[in-house]
Image: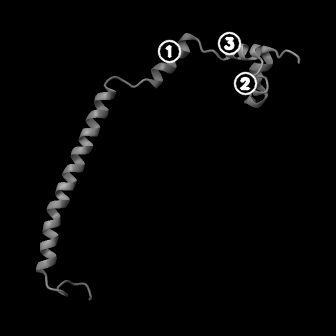
Amino acid sequence: MTRLSDKTLRRWLRTGRPTRVERHLDDPDVTARLELLTRLDAGEVAALRSLSEPGDGFEERVTAGASRRANNETAGLLIDLLGLGWHTTAAIAEPPGSDDTPA
């Protein structure tokens, strides 16, 4: 098998021909050269890290949001339960056919 040049490997990677590259991954030489060709420099690693790490106060904001959501759900449930008594009383107290809807 002929040795692939770095130029050919770069072109395959750049043009989106991963299937061509995959056929040569069993060759340790090709794998090592691909690792070198695709290695990110320190600046790129730092830029990606800054984009992927959560910002300052992220954990506190998530915790506060979850707590606020739980409080809102509890308040909504309480309001629904209080309304249930009102609606039950109204349904029992009104005689059948007293509303405006046809029977």
* Residue at 37% over, 24% down: 55
Disc 2 and disc 3 in contact, CB within 8 angstroms: no
Residue 81 occupies which quadrant of the picture?
Answer: bottom left
Cα distance, mark 2 to mark 3? 13 Å
State the image coordinates of residue 75 (x, y, percent, origin top left): 19, 51
Cα distance, mark 2 to mark 1? 23 Å
Within-10-Å neighbours for mark 1: few <14, some 14–19, many 20+: few
* Residue at 14% over, 61% down: 82
State the image coordinates of residue 56 (x, y, percent, origin top left): 34, 22
State the image coordinates of residue 17 (x, y, percent, origin top left): 76, 30
The residue carrying mark 2 is 13
- Of the image marks 1 and 3, the number of the one nearer the N terminus: 3
- Of the image marks 2 and 1, the number of the one nearer the N terminus: 2
Residue 36 is marked as 3
Q: Is residue 87 left or right of residue 48?
A: left
Residue 91 is marked as none
